């Protein structure tokens, strides 16, 4: 089994469908503390390494889906999307995997409550909410593992948005990816805070899919990435279990910087940082030197996400006037 359709067919084979008229589901955004960077299978979004993230509910996607009999209709934040838009094309291609009859169409109404200016990706929460809604609509009763596998087929990191909290995406080794999915860690960390600093909301010039592929193919530093991840996964799990914030922050920041270093050493080089990103990183390092326990992480873009504890929230808010603070374990 090496293509998406075969995986979907295998997962749904034993499910008896009893469709309802409409279903609605929510999935949270997630931010990786140990990143997913590089695929062993680009069709099935199978990663080279495991990764670990935290979800950021209530930020996420609400999706309502119903069956209709003409053609698919796609709404994003209450606006109907033309069939030719990249958003519609990606969504409809994904829905095609689940059509059991030919004259069988979906009305998908997707709402992201992530402010567009927040600099947080919505594709992970979008695909996770969609597979949860499809499962309810068809009455398949899939397990969280099966839902995570299906979400991964839409966007890799979506497999970490099925459950809420710290989620480990186990890379797995099977060519069909049936052992590659997100698992919820039992720990919660109520004092943990995340601060989003939005530097740019412009669409990135190069997608994470392209950037991952250029990096894995050409970066000399990429060779050491799996070793970095193995170490960081152990440190992060220890930090979470012991609520050791210094270990947690240091590991997450190093991991993000190592990921960006692999990009910068690829050819053509991939560099998402803007001058403001550098300024903020330097400000964080200075504040840390002065004793403030503050760390950061970044995804494939110029925006910075601060990591800190509740007791330092006031100080952080006075240092960074535009920060949007999120409480992952509310
Ligand atoms: O799942 P994708 O294709 O959007 O890739 C996500 C890549 C990073 O955000 C940079 C890292 C991660 O683990 O989320």
Image (cartoon, helix red, strand yellow):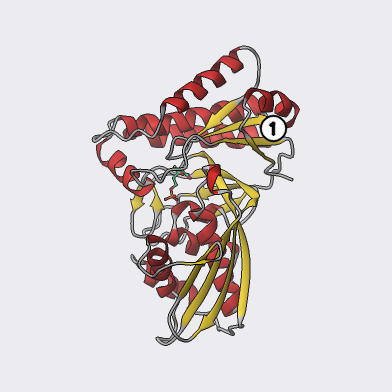
Which quadrant: the C terminus?
Answer: top right
* Residue at x 65% of width, y 18% of height: 292
Number of residues whose C-alpha sits closer than 10 Å to that of mark 1, classed few (under 14), some (14–19) or many (20 or more): few
Element under label 1?
A: helix
Q: Is residue 305 visible?
A: yes
Which quadrant: the N terminus?
Answer: bottom left
Residue 78: image location, x then y, percent: 56, 65
Q: Quadrant of residue 97?
A: bottom left
Q: Is residue 257 left or right of residue 285?
A: left
What is the total number of numbered labels drawn onto the structure image? 1
* Residue at x 40% of width, y 86% of height: 102
Q: Is residue 148 visible?
A: no
Residue 219: image location, x then y, percent: 28, 34
* Residue at x 61% of width, y 83% of height: 21
Of 190 and 67, which appears nearest the observer? 67
Q: Quadrant of residue 283?
A: top right
* Residue at x 42% of width, y 61% of height: 87
Of 247 and 123, which appears nearest the observer? 123
Q: Is residue 22 left or right of residue 299?
A: right
Residue extending farthest front: 79
Residue 123: image location, x then y, percent: 48, 55
Residue extending farthest top: 290
| Residue behind label 1 places its C-beta within 8 angstroms of ligand 1 | no
List the residue tagged with mark 1: 242
Looking at the picture, does residue 309 appear above or below residue 73?
Answer: above
Of 286 and 157, which appears nearest the observer? 286
Q: Quadrant of residue 8?
A: bottom left
């Amino acid at each position: 089994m090496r293509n998406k359709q075969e995986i979907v067919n295998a997962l749904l084979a034993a499910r008896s469908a009893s469709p309802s008229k409409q279903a609605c589901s929510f999935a949270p955004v997630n931010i990786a503390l140990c990143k997913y960077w590089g695929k062993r299978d680009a069709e099935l979004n199978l990663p080279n390494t495991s990764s670990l993230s935290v979800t950021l509910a209530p930020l996420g996607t609400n999706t309502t889906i119903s069956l209709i009999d003409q053609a698919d209709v796609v709404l994003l934040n209450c606006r109907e999307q033309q069939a030719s838009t990249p958003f519609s094309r990606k969504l409809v291609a994904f829905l095609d995997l689940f059509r059991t009859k030919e004259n069988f169409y979906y009305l998908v109404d997707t709402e992201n409550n992530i402010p567009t200016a927040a600099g947080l990706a919505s594709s992970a929460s979008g695909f996770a909410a969609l597979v949860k809604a499809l499962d309810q609509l068809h009455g398949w009763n899939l397990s969280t593992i099966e839902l995570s596998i299906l979400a991964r087929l839409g966007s890799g990191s979506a497999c970490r948005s099925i459950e809420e909290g710290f989620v480990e995406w186990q890379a797995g080794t099977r060519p069909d990816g049936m052992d590659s999915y997100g698992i919820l860690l039992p720990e919660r960390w109520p004092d943990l805070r995340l601060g989003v600093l939005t530097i740019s909301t412009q669409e990135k010039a190069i997608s994470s899919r392209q950037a991952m592929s250029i990096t894995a193919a050409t970066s000399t530093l990429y060779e050491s990435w799996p070793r970095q991840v193995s170490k960081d996964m152990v440190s992060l799990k220890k930090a979470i279990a012991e609520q050791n914030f210094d270990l947690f922050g240091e590991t997450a920041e190093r991991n993000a910087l190592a990921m960006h270093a692999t990009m910068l050493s690829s050819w053509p080089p991939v560099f998402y940082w803007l001058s403001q990103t550098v300024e903020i990183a330097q400000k964080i390092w200075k504040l840390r030197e002065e004793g403030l326990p503050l760390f950061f992480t970044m995804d494939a873009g110029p925006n910075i996400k601060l990591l800190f504890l509740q007791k330092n929230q006031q100080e952080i808010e006075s240092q960074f006037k535009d920060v949007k603070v999120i409480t992952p374990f509310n």
